[in-house]
Amino acid sequence: MKPRLDLVGIVVQDMRASLDFYRLLGLAFPDGAESEDHVEVTLEGGLRVAWDSAEVIRSFDPEWQPPTGGPAIGLAFLCGAPAEVDAVYAEIVAAGYPSHKEPWDAFWGQRYAQLRDPDGVPVDLFAAL
């Protein structure tokens, strides 16, 4: 069997803040997930996304340090229409999460916006124009 991408992992400093952010993007988490050190969801299509506290990572890699000089990963969420990019962006910013770049019509033919999750991970929203 060839290896296949199965899981994207995100290391978080504050599980509750991170899960609250991703709930605004439509992800569902089990009750009580905020108090766990490892949480994962399976997306449509089977890809899993996991959130781990820094403590969990250090339990098997004691020298682990958060990335410096910029995020180690970026995520992008497809929206159904350009207006949805604007609406989701506005909802997340109104909830107190940081904007990186307000929605714009990108030269490559998409409505695009950029946010940051509570740990600084870039999260893009996009839809075809």
Image (cartoon, rainbow, N blue to C red):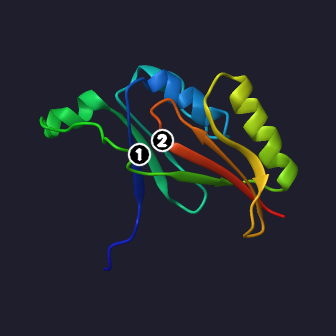
Near-viewer residue (10 or 27): 10
Sequence-wise first label, 1 or 2: 1
For mark 1, give the secondary structure: loop
Q: Which residue is mark 2?
A: 121
For mark 2, give the secondary structure: loop
Using residue 51 as the reference point, say whether residue 123 is left or right of it: right
Q: Is residue 15 above or below residue 22?
A: above
Q: Is residue 109 above or below residue 48?
A: below
The picture places residue 11, in percent across and down from the top left corner, at 36, 38
Q: What residue appears at the point 63 percent right and 33 percent down from the top-left corner?
A: 23
Using residue 78 as the reference point, say whether residue 11 is left or right of it: left
Quarter placement of the N terminus: bottom left
Q: Which residue is mark 1?
A: 71
Residue with the most extreme left position: 62
Instruction: Give how far apart the Cα atoms at labels 1 and 2 are.
Output: 6 Å
Say what amino acid the circle numbered 2 marks: Val
